[in-house]
Each structure stands twice: as structure tokens, then as C-alpha cells.
Amino acid sequence: MKKIELKFENEEGKTVTFSLDNPVEPVDPVQVNAAMDAILNENAFFSSGGDLVAKKSARIVERNVSEIEI
């Protein structure tokens, strides 16, 4: 399963990560950047370390799981 992770910095300087399942691909960096700007501008989320104050990074993460029969 693929996820997109949006990483922000909060007022305490700690990293806050929001993870969303099944991102639209191919990922458009301009749209991701605009969405992250909107999250910051609207103060849409709050963390235990205070408001989000800056963008840090964004990435696609894919996790593969292979069951082992025992």
C-alpha cells in the first residue's frame, strides 16, 4: 500500500507527520506544495507541540508485506 506523508514543523520545532492512503499518481509536486501551504495558512491542524509553522518535506512511502506460513 502506498501513502503520502506530509511533514511539518510545529512551534516546538518537532516534526509532525500526516499520512494519507492511496495518493493520486503521478504525484504533482506543485499541488502537494499548494496543499501544504493551505494547511499552514488555514491553521487546519494542531499538534501537541503547538501550531504547525513550516513545511519540512513530503514523500511517497510504499510498504510491502509478505506473509510467512508457519
Image (cartoon, rainbow, N blue to C red):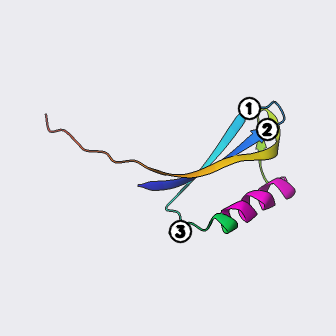
Within 10 angstroms of label 2, few (less than 14), some, or many (20 or more) residues? Answer: some
Residue 63 drawn at (x, y percent): 39, 47
What secondary structure do most residues of the magenta stretch adopt? helix
In the picture, residue 10 is in which quadrant?
Answer: top right
Position above or below: 42 against 17: below
Mark sitting earlier along the chain (2/3): 2
**Quarter of the image containing the N terminus?**
bottom left
Residue 55 drawn at (x, y percent): 75, 48
Region in magenta: 32-43
Horizontal arrangement in the rendering, residue 47 relative to residue 62 (left or right): right
Q: CA distance from mark 2 to mark 3?
A: 26 Å
Mark 2 belongs to which amino acid? Answer: Asn
Residue highlighted by disc 1: 14
Question: Residue at position x 69%, y 67% from top?
Answer: 30
> In the structure shown, which secondary structural element does the residue marked by tag 1 occupy?
loop
Horizontal arrangement in the rendering, residue 31 relative to residue 48 (left or right): left
Residue 41 drawn at (x, y percent): 86, 57
Residue highlighted by disc 2: 10
Question: Residue at position x 82%, y 53% from top?
Answer: 40
Within 10 angstroms of label 3, few (less than 14), some, or many (20 or more) residues? Answer: few
Whether residue 70 is visible, yes or no, is yes
Marker count (numbered): 3
Mark 3 belongs to which amino acid? Answer: Val
Horizontal arrangement in the rendering, residue 54 relative to residue 27 (left or right): right
Q: CA distance from mark 1 to mark 3?
A: 28 Å
Residue 11 within the segment the image draws in magenta: no
Within 10 angstroms of label 1, few (less than 14), some, or many (20 or more) residues? Answer: some
Residue highlighted by disc 3: 24
> In the structure shown, which secondary structural element does the residue marked by tag 2 occupy?
strand
